[in-house]
Image (cartoon, grey):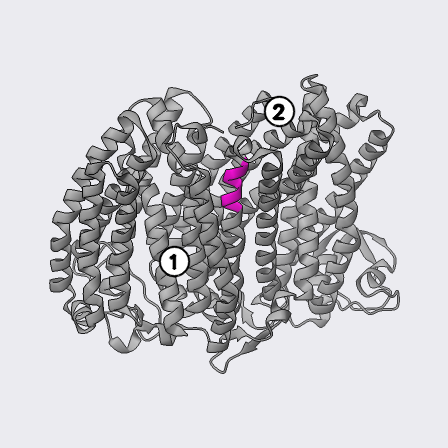
Amino acid sequence: MDALAWHRIQFAFTITYHYLFPQLTMGLALLIVIMKALALRRRDSRWDDLARFWGRVFAINFGLGVVTGIPMEFQFGTNWARFSDTAGGVVGLTLALEGLFAFFAESAFLGLFLFGEKRLGPRGHFFAAFMVLLGSWLSGYFIVVTNAFMQHPAGYVAEPNGRLELGRLGDFLFNPWAIWEYAHTMTAAVVTASFVVCAVAAYWNLMKQFEDHARAALRIGVTAGVLACALLAFPTGDQHGKLVAKYQPPALAAMEGKFESGTRADLAIVGQPNVGERRLENPIVVPELLSFLAYGSFGATVEGLDDVPRDQWPDSVELLYFSYHIMVGLGTLLLALMGVAAILLWRGVLHRTKAVLWMLMLAFPFPYIATTAGWMTAELGRQPWVVYGILRTARATSPRVGAGDVAFSTLGYAGLYALLSVLFLYLVAREIARGPTQAPA
Amino acid sequence: MHATWYFLLAGMLAAYAVLDGFDFGAGIVHLFVAKTDAERRAVLGAIGPLWDGNEVWLIASGGVLFFAFPRAYSAAFSGLYLALMLVLWLLILRGISIELRSHSKHPLWCAAWDATFAASSSAMAIVLGVALGNVVRGVPIDATGYFEQDLFATPGGAQPGAVDPFTAVFGVFAFTVLGAHGATFLAWKTSGSVHDRCREAGLRLWLASLVLLPFVTATIALGEPGFFGRFMARAPLWLLPPCAAAAAFVARRSLADGRELRAFLASSAFIALMLFATAGAMYPTILRSTIDPAFTVSAHSAASNRDSLAVGLLLCTPGIVLAVGYLAYSFRAFRGKSDGAAARH
C-alpha cells in the first residue's frame, strides 16, 4: 500500500471514530436544554435529575470528543500538507473561528454546567446548558462550512500560484451546500441522541427501575426522535440530495448504481453494482422515481457513469453505493420505529408495550451506523477530489511523510482508540446502572 | 498585517504555554505533592474545570496558523510528523487521565490514572521545550518548501534530529519552569499539606530555573549565534529578559512569603516574557531553513493574502476578546481553594 492509501485510511478511521462522540453531544445538548427548560417551567425535579444524569453522560462523551478531536485539526497539516497549503487561506478561517467562538464557550460553560449547579441557581444553570448547546452547534456549523467548501467550493479566489484565498466571505460562510448539510447533520445528531435517551429509558423501564424518570425521558426522547427522523428525510435529506444531483452528478450516479444515462431513471432499492460489467445485479427498483427525486421531474435526465470520464469516477463505486443505501435504509427503519413509538406514547401505553420498549432499547447503534454511512456517502462521493473540481486527493498529501510513518501512527491510533472504547463503555454502563437520582454538584 | 498576525499567534501560543503550562506543571509535581486520595483529588480539582479551556488555546492557535500562514502550517506539521503524533497521543492520555480518574474509587484505577497524568504531563512539558528549541535552531526546509526531520539523528546523518543536545536543553528548562509554574498555581489553589508541599517544591524548582536560565542563554548564544545576534540587534528587546528574570525572582519570593496569587502572576509573566523575547528575535521568521536562508518560511512568504487576513482579523478579534472574558469568568467562578469537589463527576 502506498502512502496515499495509508493517509486515507488514517483520516477515515480517526474521523469516523471521533464523530461517534460529537454526534451524541450535539444532539444531547439540545435535549438537555429542553429538560432544563421543563424543569424551570414545571418545577418538576425529575427533569432536573434527568438533565444532571445526561449531563454526566454528556461529560464522558465530551471528554472523548475533545481528545479524539485534536488529532483531526492537526491532521490537515501532518497528513494533508498540500491541501493545507492550497486551501488554508480559506478553510483555515473556519477552523480558527471554531476554536475562538465555539470551543472556548463550550469548555467554559460545560465546567459551569457540571460543577456549578448550586453556585449558579436554576436560571444560571439553564443558561450554562444553553451556552453549551450554542457552543457545540456553532462548532458543528464551522466544521460543516469547511466540509461544504471541499464539496462545493464557494466564496474563494484562485491565485495565479494555485493557492485559494477568501473571496466573498458571505458566499463562503453561507454556502447553500453548508446550509443543507448542516441542517441534515444536526437533525441526524438529534436522532442519535433521541435513540440513546430512549434506549436508556426503555432499559430502566424494562428493569422496573427509576420508572417515573424513565417515562419522562421516553416522552422527550420519542417526541424529539420522531420529529427529527421526519426532518431528516424531508426537507433536509431531500434538499441535500438535490444539491448532490446538481453539483456532483458522478456521485449521484455511483450512489444509485446508475451506469446508463437516461430520462425516467429508476430508483434502486436493492441491488449490487457490478462495476466490471457496468450493471446493477439483482435490482429491485421504483420506476422513474430517481429522476423526480433528483431533479423534480420524471422526464429529467440522470447522467450515468458511462458518460463520465473514468478519471472522474468516485474511486469506490461499490462502497459509495452501499454507504448511501445503508444510510437511507436505516433512516427509513428508524423513522418507522419512532413513528410506532410516538403513536403508542400519545395513546399513553408506550411504557407498557414491552415489544416496542425492547426495540427502542436495542436500536441505539443504528443511528450511529446511519450517520457514519451518511458521512461516508458525502466523503466518497467527493472523490477523486479533496476540493471538488480543484484539487485531487492524490495531490493533497504531505510529500515527505512516508507510508511507514503513517502506518505506524495509524496502528498507534487503533491501539489507543481500542483502549478508549473499553473505558467509554465501562463508564457509560456504570452511569446507566447508577441511574438519574444523584445529588447536584 | 503580517506582523499583526505573527504577534497575535505568538500571543496565543504564549497564552497556551502559561495556561496549559500550569496543568502540565501540576502533573509534573502531582505524585510528589499529593500523597493521599483526597490530596490528589484536590490537585485534580484545581485544574479540573480549567484544563480543557486551556487546551483550546492550542487548538485555536493551530487554526490561526492554518489560516494566516498556511505554508508554515503545512511545512511544520508534516515535517515534524512523528513528533506531532507524540504530542497528540500525550494530549489524549493527559486529557483522559484527568477526566476518568474520578469515576471510580478503586485504588488501582486511581493509581493508574495518577501515574498516566504525571507521565504524560511531564513528557508534554519536555516536548514543548524541544519544539521551541527546534523553532529557534531551524529545520532543514529545502527548495520544495517542505522538510522531513527524524526524531533523532542516525549516526553519520547529515541533519540533526528533532531531539539533540541543543534542543534537549530547552526540554529540561521547560520541564523545570513549568514544574515551578504548576507548583506555584497549586500552592495558590490548594490548602493544608498539599499546599505546603507545593510551596516547597515551587521554591526548589524556581531556584533550579533561575540557575538554569544563564546556562540556557549561554547555550543559545553559543549554539545559535545567528539567532542571538538578531536579538542583540533589536535594542527594545533587551528589556524583556531582565524583566523576565525579575518576574522569576518575584515569583519565588512571593511564594516564600505566602503571597500566592502574586507568585502565580509573576510566574505567568516570566513564561510570557521569555516567549515574547524569542518571538521578537525571530520575527519575521517562522521556520528558519538550516539548508539555505532563501528557503526560510517567514511571515511574509507564508501568509495568506492581505484581504483574507484583514477579513480574518475582523472576525477573529471578537472571538479572542470573548475567550479572555470566558477565562476570567471561569477563574472567578472557581475561585478559592480546591477541596477536590470539582474532581468528582
Give how far across and how far down residue B341 sits, in percent.
44, 28
Question: How many numbered callouts?
Answer: 2
Q: Nearer the viewer, residue A89 or B74?
A: A89
| Residue sitting nearer the eye, A350 or A131 | A131
Q: Which residue is mark 2?
A: A436
Mark 2, other Cα within 10 Å: few <14 / some 14–19 / many ≥20: many
Q: Which mark is residue B230?
A: none
What is the x, y in percent for residue A39?
A: 69, 32
Q: Label 2: state its secondary structure.
A: loop
Q: Residues within 10 Å of mark 1 (few under 14, many from 20)?
A: some
Are the two marked residues, 1 and 2, in contact with CB atoms closer than 8 angstroms?
Answer: no
**Residue at x 72%, y 62% (from the top left corner):** A252
Q: CA distance from mark 1 to mark 2?
A: 40 Å
Determine the residue positioned at 85% across, 58% down: A289
Q: For this view, does A222 lie left or right of residue B88?
A: right
Residue B143 location (% of width, % of height):
32, 75
Which residue range is magenta in the image?
A106-113
Q: Amino acid at mark 1?
A: Met
Q: Is residue B219 visible?
A: yes
Disc 1: which residue: B12
> Furthest residue to the top?
A208
Q: Residue at x 26, y 57 (%)?
A: B273
The answer to whether residue A7 of the structure is visible from this angle is no
In the rendered view, does B109 fall on the left or right side of A223? left
Q: Quadrant of residue A174?
A: bottom right
Q: Secondary structure at mark 1?
A: helix
